Image (cartoon, rainbow, N blue to C red):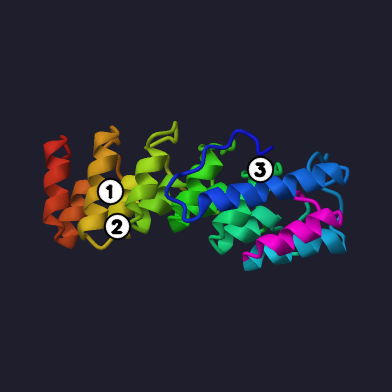
């Protein structure tokens, strides 16, 4: 059976995906379960790389075949990607679901320091993000810029991803290597439009420090005013920004 992974009901065809995943996992268990319960990742062999390649293409049947042939879910390719990370780069939800159900590590990072969780948050891949959060995502983990998943989600205007992350213990005032918080990135790298304005509103509601300045001492309100983001400035002022 598939482990207890809560799945967003809105994923298209989710019942058939679950049924297919359950069948794949059952077949793997009957074949000896080699791909399901592994220790530390060994050097990748041909079957392991076949799992990763199929995952990157979103080929659920191809992943299943490679796993039945002995391919594992913990192996990595030359870029350091696990099969789950390869699936996440392509936003292949059914494959990601299968791989998480088979025990893939949602926090395993590749050579770019992306994990399935961090990448899903940064790219706004909401279904995979929800699945990673229900599969043990480390919400305090950071990317190559030293930022949590919340920071690039705010930067790129992924409103729903920000909402989902703010339901967790993600540190809302975490400062990345650039000296920016999620609030600062939403303003500095955002476009001042409806999505970034809503993200500022969400972060303020989540008690983000509206006076936490960047490494040059420039506060969020000053950045908003410089860019002419009147509505964002109003939200900050109402929250006590100076």
- Report if residue 64 lies within the magenta region: yes
Q: Which residues are magenta?
A: 58-74
Report the residue at 76% width, 64% height from top: 78
Q: Which secondary structure, mark 2?
A: helix
Label placed on residue 101? 3
Which residue was labeled with disc 2?
A: 188
Q: Position of residue 105 (x, y in %)?
A: 67, 43
Label placed on residue 199? 1
Number of residue marks = 3
- Quadrant of the rendered image containing residue 67: bottom right
In the picture, measured across the screen, residue 106 lies left or right of residue 186, that is right
132 or 235, nearer to the observer: 132
Considering the image in quadrants, where does the N terminus appear?
top right
* Alpha-carbon span between mark 2 and mark 3: 38 Å
Q: Are marks 2 and 3 in contact (CB under 8 Å)?
A: no
- Is residue 19 visible from the viewing direction of this image? yes
- Is residue 121 visible from the viewing direction of this image? no
How many residues crowd around disc 1 within 10 Å: few (fewer than 14), some, or many (20 or more)?
A: many
For the residues carrying marks 2 and 3, which lies nearer the camera in this image?
Answer: 3
- Quadrant of the rendered image containing residue 137: top right
* Alpha-carbon span between mark 2 and mark 1: 13 Å
Report the residue at 21% width, 59% height from top: 192
Q: Position of residue 82 (x, y in %)?
A: 70, 55
First in residue order: circle 2 vs circle 3: 3
How many residues crowd around disc 3 within 10 Å: few (fewer than 14), some, or many (20 or more)?
A: many
First in residue order: circle 1 vs circle 3: 3
Report the residue at 62% width, 44% height from top: 106
User: In this picture, is 90 found above or below 217?
Assistant: below
User: In this picture, is 152 found above or below 175?
Assistant: below
User: In this picture, is 190 found above or below 201?
Assistant: below
């Amino acid at each position: 059976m598939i482990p207890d992974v809560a799945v967003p009901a809105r994923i298209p065809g989710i019942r058939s995906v679950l049924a297919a995943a359950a069948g794949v996992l059952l077949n793997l268990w009957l074949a000896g379960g080699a791909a399901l319960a592994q220790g530390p990742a060994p050097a990748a062999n041909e079957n392991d790389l076949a799992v990763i390649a199929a995952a990157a293409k979103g080929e659920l049947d191809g992943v299943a075949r490679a796993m039945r042939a002995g391919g594992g879910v913990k192996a990595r390719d030359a870029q350091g990607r696990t099969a789950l990370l390869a699936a996440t780069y392509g936003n292949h939800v059914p494959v990601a679901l299968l791989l998480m159900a088979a025990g893939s590590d949602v926090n395993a990072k590749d050579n770019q320091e992306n994990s399935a969780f961090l990448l899903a948050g940064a790219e706004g891949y909401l279904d995979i993000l929800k699945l990673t959060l229900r599969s043990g995502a480390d919400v305090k983990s950071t990317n190559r810029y030293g930022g949590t998943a919340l920071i690039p989600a705010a930067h790129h205007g992924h409103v729903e991803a920000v909402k989902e992350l703010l339901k967790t213990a993600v540190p809302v005032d975490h400062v990345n290597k650039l000296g920016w918080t999620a609030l600062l990135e939403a303003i500095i790298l955002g476009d001042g439009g409806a999505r970034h304005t809503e993200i500022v509103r969400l972060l303020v509601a989540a008690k983000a420090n509206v006076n936490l300045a960047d490494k040059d001492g420039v506060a969020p309100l000053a950045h908003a005013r410089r860019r002419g983001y009147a509505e964002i400035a109003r939200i900050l002022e109402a929250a006590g920004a100076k």
